[in-house]
Amino acid sequence: MKTSPDAVQDQISSCLKALDGLNRCMRGRNWAKLGDRNRSVNHEMDRLRSIVDDLSDLDDNLVSQLKNLNLQFRRTQRQLSSQISTAESDIESLEKGMRKVEMIKEALES
């Protein structure tokens, strides 16, 4: 199958749409859908890599769009990592608080 610049352009659009969905999910703190959105982004990016690998040369416009997409992808991955770290920290704090409450409860019951 011959890959065309239009196919690359269409896939870049699909990647941007998936990234937007992941960003909206993070902003809205919709943790239940976060994994699905992240998998969707990774799937679309993999499809883009496959399409680009099949294309012999890219014009300057496509190269520029790919660079911008890569920047947005990396920025989103950093934000996702930051959100995960924050959530992990929050969970640790909650667990510590729950242990303290349990200790106090046990002390009061003795």
Image (cartoon, grey):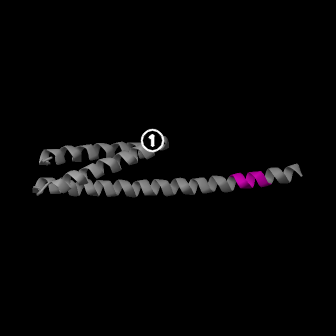
Residue, x 13% and y 44% (percent of image)?
Answer: 6
Q: Quadrant of residue 13?
A: top left
| Most foreground residue, 54 or 68 | 54
The answer to whether 37 appears left or right of 107 in the picture is: left
Question: What residue do we see at 23% from left, 55% from top?
Answer: 68
Does residue 23 show up? Answer: no
Query: Hey, what amino acid is under mark 1?
Result: Lys
Of 47 and 92, nearer the camera is 47
- Residue 66: in magenta span: no
As drawn, the residue found furthest toward the front would be 1
Q: Residue at x 78, y 55 (%)?
A: 103
Residue 59 coordinates in the image, percent (x, y): 10, 55
The image shows residue 6, relative to residue 96, as above or below, that is: above
Q: Main secondary structure of the magenta part?
A: helix
* Horizontal relation, residue 62 to residue 29: left or right: left
Residue topped by disc 1: 33
Residue 5 seen in render = yes
Residue 23 x %, y %: 37, 46
Residue under the image location 46 percent in, 53 percent down: 83
Image location of residue 102, percent across then percent down: 76, 51
Callout 1 crowding tier (Cα within 10 Å): few <14, some 14–19, many ≥20: few
The kind of secondary structure element at disc 1 is: helix
Q: Total of numbered circles in the picture?
A: 1
Q: Magenta segment, which residues? A: 98-103
* Residue 81 at x, y percent in the picture: 44, 57
